[in-house]
Image (cartoon, helix red, strand yellow):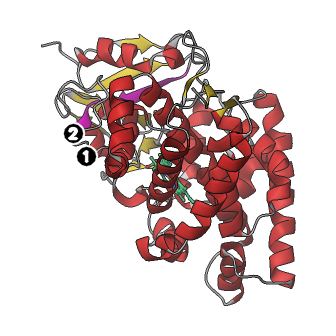
Amino acid sequence: MTDTTVDRIEQIGDDFHSDPHAYYRRWRGNGPVQHVRGTRGATFWVIIGYAEARAALTDPRLRKGIAGIAEILRAHGQALFEDAGALNAHMLNSDPPDHTRLRKLVNRAFTPRHVAAMRPRIEEITATLLDDMAGHEQVDLLAAFANPLPTTVICELLGVPLADRDDFQGWTKVLIGVSGGPEDAPAAAAAMTGYLRGLIAAKRATPAEDLLSGLVHAVDEGDSLTENELVSMSFLLLLAGHETTVNLIGNGMYRLLQNPAQHRALLADPTAIPAAVEEFLRYDGPVGWATLRYTAEAVRIGETDIPAGELVYVALSAANRDPARYPNPDHLDLTADPTGHLGFGHGLHFCVGAPLARLEATTAFTALLSRFPHLRLADETFTPHWQTNVVLRGLDRLPIRLQP
Ligand code: HEM
């Protein structure tokens, strides 16, 4: 057994995103916690063991508060651009008691009962998108379906005009580092902030039956939500609502098409689709690494001592393929039981949108498989190009052929 207390720093290369699991497999022999240097030179800790990741996600010594993270980043010479302040005051960047107060405001909108009521509309949007696809022999599944489905749903839920989609998706992609460079981020943050402030002002003037109007109302009723928290909450919900589910559909369909026997089995038994969605989340879920946290005090995890004031990534994708938890973890098995996977996180910050994401993905796979039973990759030699992003894992395109 290697002594992991010896501080050995693993370097991440430019090839990381094409196959993160190759790195994880190499690292595993060295213990469940790795000290890593990223491609831009910063060092941080990465938890790759399942048991350790699950424990870390409920460990109050590992915090998410944005002020703490910003201070450490500054010490590494990596400023968190100040202009994004109005977008950063959200629950995923907060610890209790702020987190508790912020999350309570939206919990209700995402209960299984509330989400179930959205099913008919989600089925309708799905059917319309598939009708549009049906006229083509070949489409990019991401552009034609996997992106517009969750985007339309979250726009309707929040009360954001779908017509503004190109704008807010463009800014979001810069802010999460999928397009542009760090130099583009301040302008994107300013544009996004201005856009959301305008939208919130419009909801205040003319409330509608949507979640943003409800949140504005909560503020106006004296609930302790500041204007920045309101803007940040809107930003988080809009971002999380469309940048994640797209990749559950995209990654899941790609993995299914790579496994024809399992594809056939699912076509024969669509009742297995909800369980398949869980296995897609385990095997290649939309949130790769991050879940960034920092140590508020020194923490010992496994055999590793992490000092106070360090950045820690809980690598959900690595935990979900820990052989100590899942036998044969690098094999997609839609009949296996992936219970307990960490694809939606765990603990206080467990994804509030999980019931919605599950419903959208189940609806999407059910409709896609029944409508296009011959669906396959447009090109058997297709080489996937994965976005180079530590937070989100997704393809940039997925060309598929719809007809035999
Ligand atoms: C939190 C994954 C869809 C809203 C999280 C976290 C994960 C996650 C892993 C926890 C991050 C951490 O602990 O650091 C996913 C995946 C999705 C998805 C894989 C789709 C397949 C959605 C949707 C929404 C949403 C559709 C909203 C409409 C949120 C919010 C949080 C969150 C608001 C923060 C919760 C908190 O801090 O308490 N999500 N998510 N997510 N997600 Fe999702």
Are discs 2 and 1 less than 8 Å apart at CB? yes
Q: Secondary structure at mark 1?
A: helix
Q: Which residue occupies the extreme front position in the image?
A: 404
| Residue under the image location 42 percent in, 32 percent down | 284
Horizontal side of 317 relative to 401 (left or right) equals left
Examine the rendered structure and indicate whether residue 212 appears above or below residue 349.
below
Quadrant in which residue 221 is drawn: bottom right
Q: Magenta segment, which residues?
A: 42-50
Q: Is residue 235 visible?
A: no
| Residue under the image location 50 percent in, 38 percent down | 286
* Residue 40 drawn at (x, y percent): 61, 18
| Residue under the image location 17 percent in, 12 percent down | 2
- How crowded pointer 2 is (Cα within 10 Å; few <14, some 14-19, many 20+) is rated as some
* Residue 201 drawn at (x, y percent): 85, 75
Quadrant in which residue 42 is drawn: top right
What kind of residue is marked 2? Ala
Res 51 label: 2
Magenta residue check for 219:
no
Quadrant in which residue 300 is drawn: top left
Examine the rendered structure and indicate whether residue 191 appears above or below residue 194.
above
Residue that badge 1 annotates: 55
Q: Secondary structure at mark 2?
A: helix
* Residue 381 drawn at (x, y percent): 56, 9
Horizontal side of 208 relative to 250 (left or right) equals right
Which quadrant would the N terminus be assigned to in this image?
top left
Q: Is residue 48 visible?
A: yes
| Residue under the image location 54 percent in, 61 percent down | 91
- State the residue in front, 153 or 211: 153
Which quadrant would the C terminus be assigned to in this image?
top right
* Residue 12 drawn at (x, y percent): 48, 14
